Image: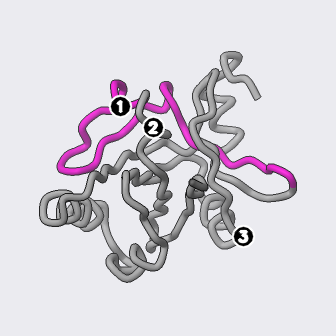
Amino acid sequence: MERRQPFCIALGQNLIVAIFNDELEELQDYAMDAGDALWYIMGTDAWLELQTKDTKSALVARSYDKTYFTCFVDDEIVEKIKRFEEGGIIVLSSNEELRQEDLLNDLEEDSSLDDIGYWIEDKSEKKGMDIGGLIFCYYSIEARKRLHGNDYID
């Protein structure tokens, strides 16, 4: 079976990356409750960064010694990301296929974190879907160097 690729969408000020459960399984022990259906990872445990891979832009989830997933993104997403030095990006993980069209149909352009959390709860409780939301810190190169100092490895 071919592995499904992560994708990223923009909803107003929120960016959502959709991946699949097994890619973040080992991070679950580090997840902190952000309320309702959303959890977060401390930026010292793992983070998202923008990288260029084979001339394509990608959001990469990583820690000091491991890459968890790579999500290639288009120019619109890159421009949105470049507007902030630090921020949170929601990563949805599910054992069922998440489709970009479905997310765009189900969620409004101006969906808040609460709206996204309610959507996750609805999918989980009413539809029996195994789905979760994890907020990752995003750091620009400058912010990463400032926060991670000499501990950071390219």
* Residue toward you, 83 or 99: 99
User: Residue 24's mark?
Assistant: 2
Q: Kindly report the distance in space between the C-alpha atoms of the residues bearing marks 2 and 3.
A: 26 Å
Residue in front for this viewpoint, 5 or 149: 5
Question: 131 left or right of 99?
Answer: left
Look at the picture and state if 61 lies above or below 102: above
User: At label 2, which amino acid type do we have?
Assistant: Leu
Q: Which mark is residue 28?
A: 1
Answer with left or right where residue 53 lies relative to residue 124: right
Q: CA distance from mark 2 to mark 1?
A: 7 Å
- Using the image as rendered, state which of residue 129 and residue 55 is in the foreground: 129
Quarter of the picture holding the N terminus: bottom right
Which residue carries the number 3 mark?
A: 75
| Element type at mark 2 | loop
Contact flag, marks 2 and 1 (Cβ < 8 Å): yes
Q: Position of residue 48 (x, y in %)?
A: 57, 43
